[in-house]
């Protein structure tokens, strides 16, 4: 099955302001975030991975990140937007300071029992639960993965540009963890996390990677085991991996 490279958007103006951007329009990367996104593109280009498409959340900070990381990649690379990769719909929490939100009772639920958390609606922004966020993000990944498998084959690689909580929920599912444990995962701005989905189970290949060589993500020419099988004993590592 194809390999998915999950990239969180680079640092945004909302990140530096300490606010919860949610689905607010007009939230773009700051200068550091622009540099971070461009650096991810350089790393992907240097690895010469068989990337066939970059799929982005529709929100400005993710589209901007996708534009910057795609710039050094082949010009014919497909580009698309999938609403299912969009940020969690935080409803009435949208745009508010994080320090203020941390004082609310719901904050504790989000931290300790996120599967029970549902954000309050507002007139401006609809809300969803964290379970709903995870379910539609996983649907987006499955739909895109199936389409790319059919079009490009099992050795294809695609990039999904999304948001911190969304990627954490996807990675939590990939590891077999309950959503209540997803806050144990850290996903930094412009970090790279990689999952290879198989007919039997997903394999998490990278987690919150913020630098270094990505050539080890190239699909192996001769797999050591059947697709979906883990190599007993751990194997020799991916070709080109060091350290």
Image (cartoon, rainbow, N blue to C red):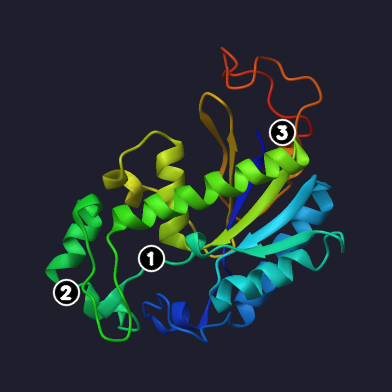
Which structural element holds mark 3? loop
Nearer the viewer's eye, disc 2 or disc 1? 1
Residue highlighted by disc 1? 88
186 is higher (above) or lower (below) than 202: below
Residue highlighted by disc 3? 154
Residue 78 has which mark? none
For this rendering, which residue is in front, 193 or 128? 128
Which structural element holds mark 2? loop
For residue 196, side relative to residue 22 (left or right):
right
Q: Is residue 186 visible?
A: no
x and y percent of residue 58 in the render?
55, 71
For residue 105, side relative to residue 183 (left or right):
left
Task: Determine the CA span between mark 1 and mark 3.
Answer: 30 Å
Task: Determine the CA span between mark 3 and mark 2.
Answer: 47 Å
x and y percent of residue 221 in the render?
81, 25
Image quadrant of residue 57? bottom right
| Mark closest to the chain's N terminus, 3 or 2 | 2
Nearer the viewer's eye, disc 3 or disc 2? 3
Image quarter where the N terminus lies is: top right
For residue 218, side relative to residue 120 (left or right):
right
224 is higher (above) or lower (below) than 76: above
Q: Is residue 56 visible?
A: yes
* Pointers 3 and 2 in contact (C-beta within 8 Å): no
106 is higher (above) or lower (below) than 199: below
Residue highlighted by disc 2? 103
x and y percent of residue 89 in the render?
35, 69
Please give the name of the residue rendered at 24% of the width and 57% of the height, measured from the top-left corner: 111
């Amino acid at each position: 099955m194809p390999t998915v490279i999950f990239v969180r958007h680079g640092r945004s103006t909302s990140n530096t302001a300490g606010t919860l951007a949610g689905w607010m329009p007009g939230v773009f990367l700051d200068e550091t975030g622009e540099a971070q996104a461009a650096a991810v593109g350089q790393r992907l280009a240097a690895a010469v991975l068989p990337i066939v498409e970059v799929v982005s959340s529709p929100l400005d900070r993710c589209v901007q990140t996708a534009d910057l990381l795609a710039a050094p990649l082949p010009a014919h690379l497909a580009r698309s937007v999938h609403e299912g990769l969009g940020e969690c719909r935080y409803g009435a929490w949208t745009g508010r300071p994080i320090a203020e939100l941390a004082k609310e009772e719901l904050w504790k639920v989000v931290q300790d029992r996120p599967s029970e958390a549902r954000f309050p609606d507002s007139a401006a922004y609809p809300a969803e639960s964290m379970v709903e966020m995870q379910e539609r993000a996983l649907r987006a990944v499955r739909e895109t993965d199936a389409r790319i498998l059919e079009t490009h084959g099992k050795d294809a690689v695609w990039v999904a540009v999304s948001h911190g909580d969304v990627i954490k929920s996807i990675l939590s599912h990939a590891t077999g963890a309950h959503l209540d444990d997803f806050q144990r995962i850290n996903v930094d701005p412009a970090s790279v996390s990689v999952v290879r989905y198989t007919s039997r189970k997903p394999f998490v290949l990278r987690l919150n990677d913020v630098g270094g060589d990505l050539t080890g993500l190239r699909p192996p020419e001769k797999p050591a085991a059947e697709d979906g099988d883990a190599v007993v004993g751990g194997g020799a590592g991916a070709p080109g991996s060091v350290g």
